[in-house]
Amino acid sequence: MTEPAEDLLGTTLAFARRALADPHWDHLRTALPEGPPARRDVRPRPLPVMAWLDGIEDQAAPDTRDLCAVLCRAAPHLAWGQTYGAADFSAGFLERYGWTELLGQRGPFVSDTIACGFLLLGPGIEYPRHRHEAEEAYLVLAGTADWLKADRGFVPRPPGALVHTPSRCWHAIRTSDQALLAFYLWSAGDLTQKSEVRPAG
Ligand SMILES: [Fe+2]
């Protein structure tokens, strides 16, 4: 019997390869590991935001539901983290925000060239404009949130959408009445960088 993290890795990589099948995304798809990556011991760490995993599959698309289910099963075995703390954002935001790295320099599977995992946001919050050196692709798994890129307005992106952000491009996410679960893939640049957040106003 495979363990939850291994199930999650296999399901995630198969999903990401399908979602990035267009030749335009060759550079991201081919960055995914071909063989089994090395393991790293990571102690499970829960966060309050995990409460929003309950029922998240109901907000998935047919193509994303299986990965949502596998993630929910693996979630208690994963280390959930936050890039920001009380000095950056309100307690209300931090209760509804978290991510877990699956593959990278910190997650249970080792990569020095990409970082990927899952972002979970509760309803009714805004992850403000931020940017980072890494190129980023998000694949929306569950929940329709509003996504902003550069100085264009917020656009709703449903489950199944691919949201691409070039290196150092400002971006933001705003949830409404649904929680959001998205797969993220960071490529190139500093893969553990704390994003630069644009001050309000
Ligand atoms: Fe980002």
Image: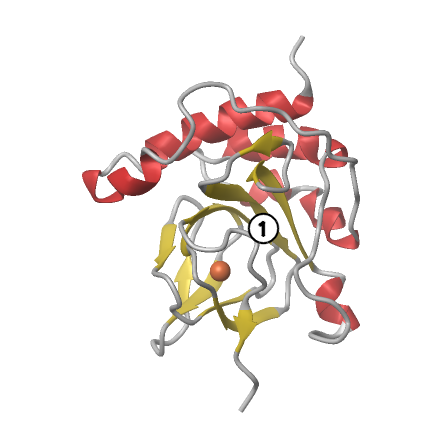
Q: Closer to the camera, 188 or 89?
A: 188
Q: Is residue 1 left or right of residue 134?
A: right
Q: Quadrant of residue 167?
A: bottom left
Indicate the position of residue 164 as horizontal and vertical percent values.
35, 55
Q: Residue at x 73, y 53 (%)?
A: 49
- What residue lies at 56% left-to-right and 84% top-to-bottom? 199
Name the residue furthest bottom. Answer: 201
Q: Nearer the viewer, residue 184 or 120?
A: 184
Residue 188 sits above or below residue 19 on the image = below
Within 8 Å: ligand 1 and the Cβ of disc 1? Answer: no
Corner quadrant of residue 126: bottom right
Circle 1 — which element?
strand
Residue 69 visible in image:
no
Q: Label 1: which residue?
A: 119
Q: Residue at x 43, y 28 (%)?
A: 33
* Residue 123 visible in image: yes
The x and y percentages for residue 148 are 42, 69
- For residue 165, above or below residue 140: below
Q: Picture coordinates of residue 35 (x, y %)?
A: 44, 19
Q: As drawn, is 124 to the left or to the right of 50?
A: left
> Which residue is drawn at the image coordinates 73% and 34% (left, top)?
42
Name the amino acid type tagged 1: Leu
Q: How is the image coloured?
A: secondary structure
Q: Residue furthest top?
A: 1
Residue density around tag 1, few if under 14, some if 14–19, many if 20 or more, within 10 Å: many
User: Which quadrant: the N terminus?
Assistant: top right
Find residue 156 and report its horizontal and vertical position in percent: 42, 63
